[in-house]
């Protein structure tokens, strides 16, 4: 059995020129970013999508140069998604606008950001992996997105299976 994710992942890595710089907050905003949705397993359908979302990471309040990735799990949209990334570094606010490529189920988008000598946040590099292996740590909370899994089991005496899935 091969497992794959039904979500896209945005991975952000931030570095700085100064070893003592602290990341206080990190969050993203996008008008077409989906912050809440219901998922229908076995059918792969996303229902009741709420756009105009703000997602925050739970892994902030750390040193910038510790190599930690900040992951955001996103509902696939299949279209380009403009976002604004907000970071608070050393109690100073930074904003960066960018456009994510089309979000596909199981894809990984990595943004490598850097706070330069002038204190400006910019993209150092980025890459997209269209299919990634499923290795999500179950102990860590990744972001503030809300997903619910909805399905209905119905007894069907006319089939070999005791239950069938109903939309």
Image (cartoon, rainbow, N blue to C red):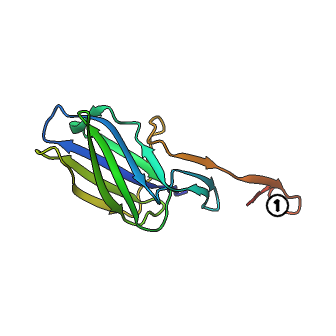
Examine the image and state in which quarter residue 30 appears. Answer: bottom left
> Is 10 on the left or on the right of 46, as rendered?
left
Q: Which quarter of the rendering shows the N terminus?
A: bottom right
State the residue in front, 145 or 96. Answer: 96
Residue 99: x and y in percent read: 34, 62
Examine the image and state in which quarter residue 146 appears. Answer: top right
Q: Which residue is mark 1?
A: 160
Residue 157: x and y in percent read: 89, 58
Circle 1: is it few (<14), some (14-19), or many (20+) Cα within 10 Å?
few
Examine the image and state in which quarter residue 21 appears. Answer: top left
Relative to residue 9, is residue 45 depicted above or below? below
Residue at (24% x, 50% y) in the render: 113
- Label 1: state its secondary structure: loop
Residue at (50% x, 55% y) in the render: 34
State the residue in front, 51 or 134. Answer: 51
> Is 137 on the left or on the right of 150, as rendered?
left
> Is 1 on the left or on the right of 134, as rendered?
right
């Amino acid at each position: 059995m091969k497992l794959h994710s039904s979500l896209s992942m945005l991975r952000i890595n931030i570095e700085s020129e100064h070893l003592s710089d602290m990341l206080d907050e990190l969050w993203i905003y996008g008008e077409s970013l989906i912050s809440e949705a219901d998922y229908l397993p076995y059918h792969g359908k996303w229902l009741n999508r709420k756009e105009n979302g703000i997602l925050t990471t739970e892994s902030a309040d750390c040193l910038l140069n510790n190599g930690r990735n900040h992951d955001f799990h996103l509902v696939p949209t299949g279209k380009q998604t403009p976002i604004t990334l907000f970071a608070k570094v050393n109690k100073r606010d930074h904003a960066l606008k960018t456009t994510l490529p089309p979000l596909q189920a199981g894809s990984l988008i990595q943004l490598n950001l850097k706070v330069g000598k002038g204190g400006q946040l910019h993209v150092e590099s980025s890459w997209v992996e269209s299919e990634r292996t499923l290795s999500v740590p179950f102990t860590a909370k990744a972001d503030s997105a809300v997903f619910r899994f909805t399905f209905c089991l119905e007894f069907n005496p006319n089939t070999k299976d005791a239950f069938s899935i109903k939309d």
